[in-house]
Image (cartoon, coloured by chain):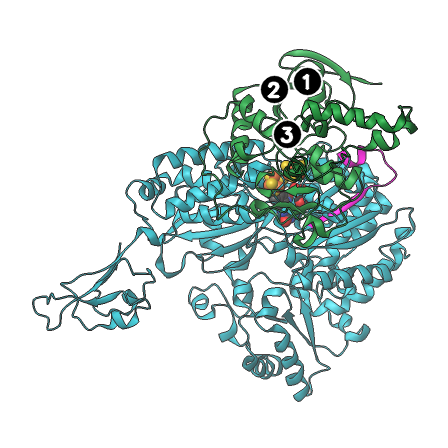
Amino acid sequence: MITVEQLNEIRKNSIPKVALRKKVFETRVPELQGDISGLLKEGNEKTYRAHILCCAGTGCKSSGSDKLREEFERVLEKYGLSDEVKIVKTGCFGLCAEGPIVVVYPEDAMYCKVGIEDVEDIVTEHIMNGRIVKRLLENYAAREKEGEITEEDLEGSTFFKKQMRIALHNCGRINPEDIEEYIAIDGYQALAKVLTQMTPDDVIKVMLDSGLRGRGGAGFPTGRKWMFAKASVSDQKYVCCNADEGDPGAFMDRSVLEGDPHEVLEAMAIAGYAIGANHGFIYVRAEYPTAVERLTIAIKQAEEYGILGDNIFGTDFSFRVELRLGAGAFVCGEETALMTSVEGHRGEPRPRPPFPAVKGLFAEPTILNNVETYANVPQIILKGADWFKAIGTEKSTGAKVFALGGKIKNTGLVEVPMGTTLREVVYDIGGGIPNGKKFKAAQTGGPSGGCIPASLIDTPIDYDSLIQIGSMMGSGGLIVMDEDTCMVDIAKFFLAFTVEESCGKCPPCRIGTKRMYDILDKITRGEGELKDIDDLYELADAIKSSALCGLGQTAPNPVLSTLRYFKDEYIAHVVDKKCPAGVCKALMQYTIDREKCIGCGKCARNCPADAISKTDYVAPGHKLPSMAIDQSKCLKCGACMEGCKFGAISKK
Amino acid sequence: MKMINLKIDGTPVTVPEGTTILEAARAAGVKIPTLCFLKDINEIGACRMCVVEIKGARALQAACVYPVSEGLEVITNSEKVRKSRKITLELILSNHDRRCLECSRSQNCELQALSKELGVNEIRFPALNEKTLLPIDDLSPSVVRDPNKCVLCRRCVSVCKNVQTVGVIDTMERGYRTVVASPFGKSLADTPCVNCGQCIAVCPTGALTEKSDKSKVWAAISDPEKYVVFQTAPAVRFSIGEAFGMPQWSPPSEDSASTRFLTPTQARTLRSWKRAPSS
Ligand SMILES: Cc1cc2nc3c(=O)[nH]c(=O)nc-3n(C[C@H](O)[C@H](O)[C@H](O)COP(=O)(O)O)c2cc1C
Ligand code: SF4
Ligand code: SF4
Ligand code: FES
């Protein structure tokens, strides 16, 4: 057990650890304002003059950041700089496609796609000579031309500029495996404030006033959830954290856990105090080994430092957190299935009511919140409900992290105030669609959500606007589609996911989604009839209203929303037997224009199926007979068209 | 006990707290179809046949597990409800071996009865065929499991696990591939199944049936070279009936399955034979 005074002492002693990162922390840590040279002389940080932050998030790890860190160590050693430069392992920066990412402080210079061979340059140029290695800055040349970036403002990247980082505020800026760095930047101050200055009702009131809504899917007001759980009378209650993150493409929860695990622990303890629970469970998927490792370290450190455990800060509040690993079933993100799984049973939803706030984990009152939801809590406590409420829209306060993916230039995590329009996210932050293609639609909410067509690109992204246009926020997946995307195919893709992930408990979802999938498959094979579209509507309606849990109840959404905005595409498949985007293989043909074909035969050599042969027709002006494709053999792979230099082959 | 007032199809009903909508409706004489529900044994809200509309709720709710609350307004028979139940049933049937005439549960099947009750007279999805039919497990000495007849109501799972505390069957796989099976896909014969037959007793369909030895019995009876000695099942009354105040060697009841199987003459013979030892 430590006291608040001891926490403040640790904070003071730890500030030198992050002092070189003044540029990003000075607004939060008053001690870092102005001259910090005094601070640098304290603690064991006195010899450092630069910090090299290497992303060790899952994305950058897979692009080789572990090797990179070793290389930095080797090169620094070589130049005798090991005592002057500290290498810091961080969580994800969000710009994973540009990884591995390295940030050098005090300049806050962010280097992208750093290879082993670039390490020497960064050390000799930047560290030794103070010259920024411009070629490694994100898209430097273009941005310099636009005047977006200067030597003074390296962070000029629009990718970050338009963002507002709340849940992600520490990600990529601290060492997640060092509790002292977290404490240095006000970590656990919110918990201290709550325990020593606020009653549980005060905490709930702040949460209610802040307007924070769940970031895990349904957008339920967090304060209300806590209020219900507090009202339930029981000796034992539980606080759960949903880190199952099953939405394909979403990885914000992983990034928070990998980059800022203490934030979540702190928030869970605050929630525990508010509802009267002394035990927390984090349900995290086993496929997130780095997150599991960082959480394990964080829990251990918090216990060692006397922050988690009995009589926290000398009060009579005790709180402990345990991890539970999930096997990666999407349905286990559903709250009742998650609890069933934590209890050690097959992860299947159970009917509500009773709601978890009354009868949840082990039949006790329980709250479950999402990782990102929790990541907002300590800041709301410290800065107040009004600060949070002023961000975003009236009914959707704060900011939301999106995992931007698909046909977009900058993929990665972006956190923007609620109410930002889809256009701003796609064009200003995402950098637009690559290869000069047209924006066709964006899918939000993953397999439970829907597609937003180009005509609605100015829709503000908030819970209610998205529901209104037939999509939903979900956990924040945002997949951009260009003109080459077939909307029937997309609907089929998402439905294939739900068919695969349905738990199998109730027939509407278990069998109904499969029947819908079969119909879509039939349509993409060119065998659809108009009646199939009626059947899709009828099944969708029945599944939505009768499935047991949210998975089934939302599974038809991708189909309904594409039917709503792209019905003509369905009709084209069914009636004209055409796939307008040229995706559905059964509905298109490669043909050779016999007037253009010079008979070189390259296509025939490229064809893996031996489907192309000579005809007896020689076009006027050509010497050799033209080629033709035997449609019955054609695999529709497109190899012939790619190879033809004369543009004689086309896809229809 | 606290009483709760609610309305079912517009009629006020008062029931004790903790009652489900299904029980409240039954008390009020309103019939709601069910399939997976088995009082006290299987109350899991899985099959969605009992869905009802609740005023203020977006989705339909399963009456069998929904606890009543003050002022609740329930509609059990709206167009929406009827349509939903019928489609759900149609979906279940779309994944069912529909050769009822060859099924031992024909005419005594809850699924068949439901189809009749809900007026399912057309199933728009193709029936299971050789490719989609799953193998039948008939290796156990007494229980035959036909997954193609299973509606995944899980009554058998519950009774085996919670009532008999044997637990040799459970749901495996997920989604469309979900089946009720024994661990690692073993045959029931290779599990510690105690052959109590409770799963058969609770199964609403022909997915779990007793292994029939009728033809063997017939063959033995018709064999002039054989002296045939009967022991009928259930044999409990005959062997230990006196412990429960019955006359020693009480014959099985007239309508026990095995007695019904016999011709009247054979049954008479059996009774006289049964009485013989006590005289
Ligand atoms: C099929 C399904 C999957 C879900 N998956 C997740 C998930 O991976 N992570 C999550 O936080 N919430 C998920 N949810 C939402 C949770 O049920 C729950 O609403 C949420 O965790 C509550 O936290 P919040 O209020 O902070 O958002 C899922 C819901 C459904 C129906
Ligand atoms: S809706 Fe799907 S995932 Fe949910 S209980 Fe039913 S079968 Fe399981
Ligand atoms: S075997 Fe019978 S009782 Fe068991 S789940 Fe299938 S239908 Fe239900
Ligand atoms: S009888 Fe209610 S869900 Fe099956």
Q: Does the residue labelled 3 lie within 8 Å of ligand 4?
A: yes
User: A465 above or below B113?
Assistant: below
- Which is nearer the N-term, disc 3 or disc 2? 3
Q: Is mark 2 on a helix, strand or loop?
A: loop
Mark 3 → mark 1, Cα distance in angstroms: 16 Å
Q: What is the letter of the cyan chain?
A: A
Whether the magenta-drawn stretch holds residue A539 is answered as no
Q: Dot 3 corresponds to which residue?
A: B35
Q: Is mark 1 on a helix, strand or loop?
A: helix
Q: What element carries label 3?
A: loop
Query: Which residue is at the front of the view, B40 or B247?
Result: B247
User: B213 above or below A65?
Assistant: above
What chain letter is assigned to the residue under label 1?
Answer: B
Which segment is the magenta one? A228-242
What chain letter is assigned to the residue under label 3?
Answer: B
In screen coordinates, is A343 left or right of A412?
A: right
In screen coordinates, is A430 left or right of B268?
A: left
Q: In this view, which residue lies farthest toward the left?
A: A620
Residues at discs 2 and 1 in contact (Cβ within 8 Å)? yes
Three-letter amino acid code of the residue under disc 1: Ala
Residue B193 image offset from top left, x and y in percent = 75, 46
Q: Dot 1 corresponds to which residue?
A: B25
What shade has chain B been given? green
